[in-house]
Image (spheres, rainbow, N blue to C red):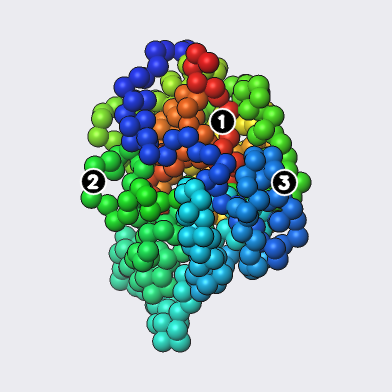
């Protein structure tokens, strides 16, 4: 583990990302539509409290009656959430274009795939039986058994339309995009790497979506208040980046190496603003080893939060692991998003299902914009997020700006 010393700001990197993101700068309260679930106690009150604190027009509250569960069916999503949101956006079109949705505690977190019909259920049952028999089948090597098991699992996932499940937030980001195929992710036109490419959706069809959520209403009120208080004085403390290796060599990196390299780059940029500790070893930060934690990004402890951090008021961080935002309510869960919110962070990011590593916001892009001070939390997230109609969720106030621009 080593403390990163400040180096020259990566001006070229900033300029590149700023050009990629210029269409989403300067988010205003008047551009926000707030969505609450009046079937969940406290949701509407939280929405009204947030709107008052952020001077969001009262007419920009959309209160709906949705399931109180964290998962909603695709049919309910289309009828009770997507439809009313689209109608509200059209209603406000003559006013000021809504660019951002804020989902409040109580709005479901996940969209389930369409349920299978009887014939599909029977096919899946047969495949599961075959999978069990394959484990015991003689004459097959361990490698052949593993290969066949994967083939069966892939077919089950196809039949069950697993690639149609998604975060509610990520689907709502495309509510203006019309019909699109529900077969996995869709490239985000705001992501820097996709600039200038022919894509399925355009920037003006994409909304910024975040949520003010957590294990209970008390936590959400705390998040709102911490955000506002931190903006007045600026986020203070240390940044912690938990890589797995020394900086991976090469420029054409992919997968885990790309994201590990990105953690190294993020650490260098953030060191321009606040003290940084970069861990380059395979293990995670030890328990109680991260005092005054203001920023964090690292990996990989699946569904097993490590109590390493003394979180500062207004802290922001996320952990690179699968389904770490699968629930924000379940008691006893060790998922990172839930635990971080419960222990004091003001914002976090995580997937509701398996996102694959390339589904995460790229750390160097997210933290570069955040500490530069010109973009809000929501804008920094949007330009660093590769895919939509997928699994990722931002929990936090999209207007939150924890740092002032350098020189101000």
Residue occupying the point 66% across, 28% down:
230
Taking the image as drawn, is residue 394 in sight? Answer: no
Graded by Cα atoms within 10 Å as few (under 14), some (14 to 19) or many (20 or more), the crowding at tag 1 reads many
On residue 49, which mark appears?
3
Q: Picture coordinates of residue 325 (x, y %)? A: 56, 51
* SS under mark 3: helix
Closest to the observer: 150 or 79? 79
Residue at 60% x, 53% y is 60
Residue picked out by circle 1: 401
Q: Position of residue 119 (x, y in %)?
A: 41, 87
Look at the numbered disc 2 and give the secondary structure of its residue. Answer: loop
Mark 3 in CB contact with mark 2 (< 8 angstroms): no
Answer with mark 2 or mark 1, whichever residue precedes in sequence. 2
Residue at figure coordinates x 43%, y 20% from the top left: 268
Distance, label 2 to label 1, CA atoms, is 30 Å
* Mark 3 / mark 1, whichever is N-terminal: 3
Rendered location of residue 395, percent (x, y): 58, 45
């Amino acid at each position: 583990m080593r403390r990163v010393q400040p180096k020259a700001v990566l001006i070229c990197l900033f300029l590149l990302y700023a050009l990629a993101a210029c269409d989403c700068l300067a988010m205003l309260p008047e551009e926000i539509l707030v969505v609450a679930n009046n079937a969940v106690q406290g949701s509407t009150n939280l929405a009204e409290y947030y709107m008052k604190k952020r001077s969001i027009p009262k007419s920009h509250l959309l209160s709906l009656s949705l399931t109180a569960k964290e998962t909603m069916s695709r049919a309910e999503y289309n009828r009770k959430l997507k439809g009313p949101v689209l109608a509200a956006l059209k209603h406000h079109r003559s006013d000021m274009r809504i660019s951002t949705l804020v989902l409040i505690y109580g709005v479901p977190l996940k969209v389930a795939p369409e349920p299978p019909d009887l014939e599909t259920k029977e096919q899946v049952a047969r495949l599961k039986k075959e999978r069990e028999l394959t484990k015991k089948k003689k004459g097959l090597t361990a490698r052949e058994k593993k290969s066949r098991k994967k083939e069966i699992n892939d077919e089950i996932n196809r039949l069950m339309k697993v690639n149609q499940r998604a975060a509610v937030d990520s689907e709502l980001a495309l509510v203006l995009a019309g019909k699109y195929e529900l077969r996995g992710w869709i490239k985000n036109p705001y992501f820097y790497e996709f600039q200038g490419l022919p894509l399925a959706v355009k920037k003006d069809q994409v909304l910024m979506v975040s949520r003010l959520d957590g294990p209970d209403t008390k936590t959400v009120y705390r998040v709102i208040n911490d955000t506002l208080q931190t903006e007045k004085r600026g986020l203070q403390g240390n940044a912690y980046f938990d890589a797995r290796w020394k900086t991976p060599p090469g420029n054409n990196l992919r997968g885990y190496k790309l994201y590990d390299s990105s953690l190294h780059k993020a650490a260098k940029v953030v060191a321009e603003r606040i003290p940084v500790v970069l861990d380059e070893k395979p293990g995670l930060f030890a328990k109680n080893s991260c005092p005054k934690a203001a920023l964090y990004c690292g990996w990989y402890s699946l569904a097993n939060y490590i109590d390493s951090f003394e979180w500062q008021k207004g802290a922001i961080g996320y952990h690179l692991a699968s389904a770490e935002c699968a629930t924000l309510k379940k008691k006893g869960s060790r998922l990172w998003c839930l635990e971080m919110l419960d222990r004091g962070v003001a914002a976090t990011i995580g997937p509701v299902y398996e996102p694959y590593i390339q589904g995460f916001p790229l750390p160097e892009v997210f933290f570069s914009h955040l500490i530069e001070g010109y973009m809000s939390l929501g804008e920094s997230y949007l330009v660093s997020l590769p895919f939509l109609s997928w699994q990722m969720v931002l929990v936090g106030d999209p207007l939150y700006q924890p740092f002032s621009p350098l020189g101000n």
